[in-house]
């Protein structure tokens, strides 16, 4: 954008883009279609370039910058509306599948505007939350058949079965093995997120109503809340406290550049949705965190079409839609007595709670040749069922390829040296598994096991017997606790590196082995 300003000698696009970034939420202008702000510059060098070159240059701009450029001149306005530019912008926010239609909108520009500023939900796709101690893992995606941004809880089930095996390489006594063949799927019957394409209303409100279910049969109401990041100093101070870390989310075990204030585990979650916690301008919107506010609507079933809710949640007032004038409280004299007074509204929020969701930086879960076990995994937690994990790998120093090449001996074949080099690259540094969903003992956001060194310092043995023949075994520590995450401690364990998609944990003190398996998140991104 700065380059464009320099090319045509006009700084207005940059300043406009920055100004638009600071626009309060109550500003409803469509920054692309409004031509009233266009003023032809005296010397527009950019507009005089060949059309193909202009289109190529504009393809590098962000949506805000593209909107700002459209106000420079009528020529650039026409170029900025080119639908292929906006299709690329939409596609950049929809990983995993090709967006081929702008339905239900007339153009991709209109589609982008209709879902702005919520495209970050599909862009980062993986979201985990602070709901109770167990949490939830949600996959957000875009369904082009309906023009809807949607999110569903990821679940895993596995048939519980155990067997015994004798493996002298691991332990002299028989081991109890919990067989693990998880079936991972989305809970499609109950969406967590559902945002339709709309160009009406204040889309930049910090709180947006979601139509998740038929209100005639489902009295639960859910609103999506945009979030504002805590100052770095505040987030750092809270993260240094003991569990639950001053109710900061995500918790400190999850690396994150953005943290927000979340709900207390035992107090009313609605307390977190106070004005100072919500963004008031576009630049304050976090694209790494959002919240969902839910409550039980106590409206009588006969008033299912009356939207009589607390319209301005920030100011504490109640708003009535047009239906209220038709089915007013005056014709139902018995209704106020249900709530203890004539001033009470026709609808009361019960169980008002706020759940905070955070995403993961892609480099945390994207495996590499040096860190092949990074990713999203599902593990067997016995009576607690299946739980989802983030497995992180950390290397203190980069792999010194030149120094390693100098260790090659004359007696090594090319294949032998290549295999030794591959092992040296990946069997080093630490491996840590953090729960994305948890249980009453060790909750979401806490480390479940850690191996401090996958290299020689942590090496225990290589298994010589089935069913783990050839698996590398390293020292690890398993995290256990009593109910409510009390009296937590780490106990000795051993990590079996079976493959890059399969791990096992030997809980030494309990003489049993549990398994962990990689999850392919991308298979859930395209609706079928």
Image: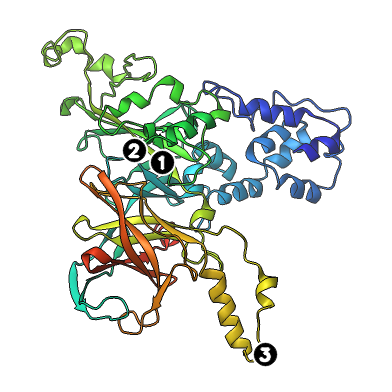
Task: Identify the residue shown where x is 69% and y is 23%.
Answer: 36
- As drawn, the label of residue 410 is 3
Name the one closer to the observer, 104 or 160: 160
Q: Quadrant of the C terminus?
A: bottom left
Q: Residue furthest top?
A: 342
Mark 3 secondary-structure assignment: loop
List the residue tagged with mark 2: 243
**Front tag of 2 and 3:** 3
Image position of 507 with respect to 305: above or below: below
Q: Residue at x 35, y 59 (%)?
A: 477
Q: Residue 45 location in percent, x, y?
A: 87, 38
Badge 1 or badge 2: first in the primary sequence: 2
**What's the CA distance linking mark 2 and mark 3?**
55 Å
Q: Is residue 114 above or below residue 281?
A: below
- Indicate the secondary structure of the residue bearing disc 1: loop
**Which numbered mark, 3 or 1, is in the foreground of this view?**
3
Q: Which callout, 2 or 3, points at the residue further toward the start of the chain?
A: 2
- Give the residue number, with chain letter if any, for mark 1: 251
Q: Position of residue 251 (x, y in %)?
A: 41, 41
Q: Is residue 425 above or below residue 480?
A: below
User: Dot 1, how many residues are within 10 Å of its Cα: few (below 14), some (14-19), or many (20+)?
Assistant: many
Location of the N terminus by quadrant is top right
The residue closer to the viewer here, 309 or 279, is 279
Q: Nearer the viewer, mark 1 or mark 2?
A: 2
CB atoms of marks 1 and 2 within 8 Å: yes
Give the image quarter of residue 380.
bottom left
- Seen at 80% across and 29% down, the residue is 11
> Earlier along the polypeptide chain: callout 3 or callout 1?
1
Residue at 18% x, 58% y is: 383
């Amino acid at each position: 954008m700065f380059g464009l300003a320099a090319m045509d000698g006009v700084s207005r696009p940059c300043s406009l883009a920055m100004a638009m970034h600071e626009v309060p939420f109550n500003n409803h202008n469509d920054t692309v279609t409004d031509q009233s702000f266009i003023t032809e510059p005296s010397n527009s060098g950019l507009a005089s370039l060949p059309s193909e070159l202009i289109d190529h240059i504009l393809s590098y701009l962000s949506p805000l910058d593209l909107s700002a450029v459209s106000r420079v001149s009528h020529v650039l306005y026409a170029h900025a509306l080119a639908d292929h530019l906006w299709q690329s912008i939409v596609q950049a926010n929809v990983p995993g599948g090709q967006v081929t239609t702008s339905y239900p909108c007339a153009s991709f520009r209109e589609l982008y505007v209709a879902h702005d500023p919520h495209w970050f939900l599909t862009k980062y796709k993986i979201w985990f939350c602070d709901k109770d101690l167990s949490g939830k893992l949600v996959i957000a995606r875009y369904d082009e058949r309906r023009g809807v941004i949607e999110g569903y809880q990821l679940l895993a089930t596995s048939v519980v079965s155990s067997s015994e095996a004798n493996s002298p390489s691991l332990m002299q006594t028989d081991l109890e093995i919990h067989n693990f063949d998880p079936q991972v799927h989305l809970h499609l019957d109950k969406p967590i997120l559902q945002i339709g394409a709309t160009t009406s209303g204040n889309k930049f409100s910090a709180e947006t109503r979601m139509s998740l279910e038929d209100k005639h049969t489902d009295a639960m109401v859910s609103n999506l809340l945009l979030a504002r990041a805590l100052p770095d100093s505040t987030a750092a101070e809270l993260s240094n406290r003991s569990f639950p870390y001053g109710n900061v989310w995500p918790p400190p075990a999850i690396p994150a550049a953005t943290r927000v204030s979340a709900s207390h585990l035992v107090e009313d979650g609605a307390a977190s949705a106070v004005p100072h916690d919500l963004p008031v301008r576009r630049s304050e919107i976090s694209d790494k965190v959002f919240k969902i506010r839910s409550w039980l609507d106590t409206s009588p079933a006969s008033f299912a079409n009356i939207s009589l809710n607390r319209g301005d949640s920030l100011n504490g007032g109640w708003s009535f839609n047009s239906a209220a004038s038709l089915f007013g409280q005056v014709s139902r004299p018995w209704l106020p007595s249900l709530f203890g007074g004539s001033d009470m509204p026709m609808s009361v929020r019960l169980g008002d709670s706020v759940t905070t969701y955070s995403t993961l930086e892609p480099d945390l879960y994207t495996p590499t040749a040096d860190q092949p076990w990074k990713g999203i995994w599902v593990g067997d937690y016995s009576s607690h069922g299946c739980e989802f994990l983030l497995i992180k790998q950390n290397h203190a120093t980069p792999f010194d390829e030149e120094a390693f090449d100098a260790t090659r001996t004359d007696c090594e074949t090319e294949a032998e040296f290549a295999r030794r080099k591959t092992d040296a690259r990946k069997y080093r540094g630490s491996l840590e598994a953090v729960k994305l969903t948890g249980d009453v003992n060790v909750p979401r956001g806490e480390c479940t096991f850690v191996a401090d060194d996958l290299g020689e310092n942590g090496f225990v043995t290589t298994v010589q017997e089935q069913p783990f023949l050839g698996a590398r075994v390293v020292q690890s520590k398993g995290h256990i606790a009593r109910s409510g995450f009390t009296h937590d401690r780490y106990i000795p364990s051993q990590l079996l590196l079976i493959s890059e998609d399969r791990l096992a944990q030997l809980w030494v003190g309990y003489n049993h082995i549990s398994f962990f398996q990689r999850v392919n998140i991308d298979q859930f991104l395209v609706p079928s």
